Amino acid sequence: MRQFKLSTLSLLAITLLFASNSLTGFSQEQYKENKVVVAKEQYKGGTFYPVQQYDQVKSKKGPKNIILFIGDGMGLAHIYASMTANGGSLFLQNFVHCGFSKTYSSSAYITDSAAGGTALSSGVKTYNGAIGVDAAKNNVETILEKAEKKGLATGLVSTSAINHATPASFIAHQASRGSYEDIAADFLKTDIDVFIGGGTKSFEKRKDGRNLSNELKEKGYQVLYKMEDIQKVTSGKLAGLTADEHNPPFSERGEMLVPATETAINLLSQNNKGFFLMVEGSEIDFLAHNNQTTGVIQETLEFDRSIGKALAFAAKNRNTLIIVTADHETGGMTLNGGNNKTGDVTAKFSSTDHTGICVPVFAFGPGAEEFTGFMENTEIAKKMMKLLKVQ
């Protein structure tokens, strides 16, 4: 009997040690841990924000600039729940050219953000966990890198750590999405003009002793940590590191993606050759993993307001293509009730993980007609490269 108790305690100790080490090694993934599954949760409607309608922009010359919005984990239910929560209207309704993206990876029917992001950045299907490499772990060139080679300005904005899977897949090349410090170091191998997101720890508190923020400063970057300082920048290269790892959810951080997007557009648009910008609403996915209806809606609404800032620029600029899509759907979200007058929404989830359902694609501006119908997620990257003339 004593021997059995000792074995049980030993196994428990080993299990706890393994769990502790796992969380330490992959602390950026903690948003997936300790999930609280809520069968139904009601979002109580609040104040609605106004939505402006913009005339469709067409040009035979094609776009000079591309802004790609990725709502991580965002499916149609997330969008329509948020539309209802805002009184039945979103900036996304300006996008009359719509299609669907098939999101499976080379290794699985259900993709993760790393493989999904790499497909959207490079036009290559790869295995789950891959960052900017193909199924054989060879580096693949991304649209951001191709644009940079052509002299265009480039930028990344994210509410997650900037070296997390989706933004990382546009700028880094690593066999594993968990190689956060290696991914951060890959930023120094590029001349990206603007990046804003969390992840300070991987840049400044590294195992190798390097301080990448100091190295960025030596390369001419303004390295700033608070949004109130970041949004005051009007010229030059900018590295905005807004959290040690991920930024808090919207309920705690408040508006971040909107001013970050506006700042990035203002800086990148100063390049006469054009620009490429990727903006990620990362925490739509985080809150969907936890089946939190209110959080999903809050994150998606901020994402939509960020799209509104890009639309205002594109409508005036008339040379900018905006694409909005997702890397995958998260949560298997369905809507069980809602009220456009009050903004109330009742939802249900079938999963605490990603699902295999196709995700929507929206486009506005020159070349928008290319993004209709069903398409592989890799086609989005290929179409962007062709339109931006950076193949």
Image: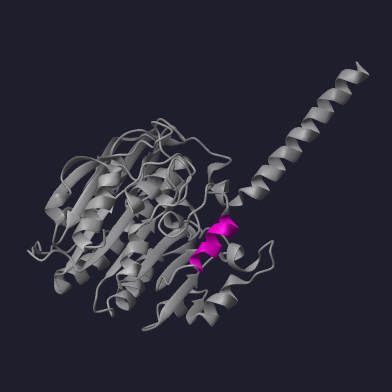
Any part of residue 36 in sight: yes
Q: Relative to 136, is 229 above or below? A: below
What is the residue that sits farthest to the right in this orientation? 2
Looking at the rendered image, the quarter that the N terminus falls into is top right
Residue 206, x across and y down, in percent: 66, 63
Residue at (15% x, 45% y) in the render? 372
How many numbered circles does the render carry? 0
Any part of residue 342 in sight: no
Q: Classify residue 41 by image quadrant.
A: top left
Residue 183 inside the magenta-drawn segment: yes
Left or right of 9 in this view: 84: left
Residue 234, x across and y down, in percent: 36, 83
Q: Relative to 124, is 389 above or below? A: below
Looking at the rendered image, the quarter that the C terminus falls into is bottom left
Judging depth in this view, the residue of 323 and 295 nearest the camera is 323
Residue 256, x across and y down, in percent: 41, 66
* Secondary structure mostly seen in the magenta stretch: helix
Q: Classify residue 90 by image quadrant.
A: bottom left
Left or right of 171 in this view: 175: right
Residue 365 inside the magenta-drawn segment: no
Residue 63, x across and y down, in percent: 17, 65
Q: Relative to 155, is 229 above or below? A: below
Residue at (17% x, 53% y) in the render? 93
Residues in magenta, as a range: 180-188
Q: Relative to 269, is 387 above or below? A: above
